[in-house]
Image: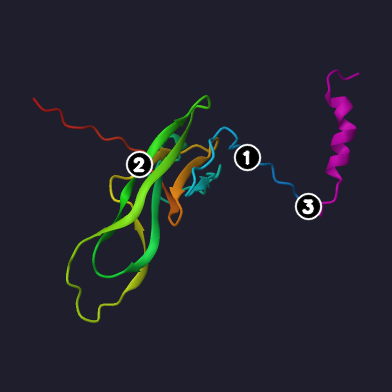
């Protein structure tokens, strides 16, 4: 006689196997934001839940290890652009969430646009485009376990893109 829980579970597993596939699938919620403080007045909470499985890159030189990946946070807004380079003045600050060991990103500024002052050619077309905050990129470690939570002033958007490191490491040149 077999020993263990499997013989007792066999009827249940058999019943589950014959259930019709037309039953609606129920999503398992992955986001638990209960440890985060509420977004302050005038701010909008943006949440990025990263996918757990990504298609392999066609470029074999890029690392397939998520520990080598980073997520760039892009905060800005859509506006009409001319030939000048435009950026929003503001910054993204990382704040630790007490007792949770996670990070909350808060955006300040974003209402003032800095622009070059080139004279655009006559008749140069204007276009809609995304204008982001000025400054170095905000890179966040890739983690499917924790959401990336960003509080940004109303009227701004939060976008993201994935950065993958090369698999190959290169040796720096020592200097005497």
Q: Quadrant of residue 116?
A: bottom left
In terms of sequence position, does the residue under pointer 2 or pointer 3 come before the other? Answer: 3
Residue 97 x %, y %: 49, 30
Q: Quadrant of residue 164?
A: top left
Residue 59 x %, y %: 40, 49
Badge 3 is on which residue? Answer: 24
In this view of the protein, which residue sits in the foreground, 166 or 131? 131
Badge 2 is on which residue? Answer: 166
Residue 65 visible in this rendered orientation of the protein: no
Which residue occupies 40% across, 45% down? 107
Disc 2 is placed on an element classified as loop
Range shown magenta: 1-24
Say if 111 sits above or below 126 in the image: above
Report how far apart the C-alphas of labels 1 and 2 lie in the structure.
Answer: 30 Å
Disc 1 is placed on an element classified as loop
Report how far apart the C-alphas of labels 2 and 3 lie in the structure.
Answer: 41 Å
């Amino acid at each position: 006689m077999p020993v263990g829980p499997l013989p007792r579970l066999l009827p249940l597993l058999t019943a589950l196997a014959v259930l019709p596939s037309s039953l609606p699938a129920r999503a398992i919620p992955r986001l638990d934001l209960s440890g985060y403080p509420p977004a302050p007045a005038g701010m909008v909470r943006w949440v990025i839940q990263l996918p757990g499985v990504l298609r392999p890159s066609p470029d074999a030189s890029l690392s397939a290890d998520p520990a080598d990946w980073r997520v760039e946070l892009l905060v800005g807004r859509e506006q009409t652009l001319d030939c000048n380079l435009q950026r929003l003045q503001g910054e993204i600050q990382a704040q630790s969430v007490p007792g949770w060991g996670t990070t909350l990103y808060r955006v300040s500024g974003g209402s003032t646009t800095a622009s070059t002052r080139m004279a655009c050619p006559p008749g140069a077309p204007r276009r809609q485009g995304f204008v982001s905050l000025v400054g170095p990129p905000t890179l966040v470690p890739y983690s499917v376990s924790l959401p990336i939570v960003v509080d940004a002033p109303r009227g701004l958007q939060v976008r993201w893109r994935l950065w993958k490191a090369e698999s190959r490491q290169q040796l720096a040149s020592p200097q005497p």
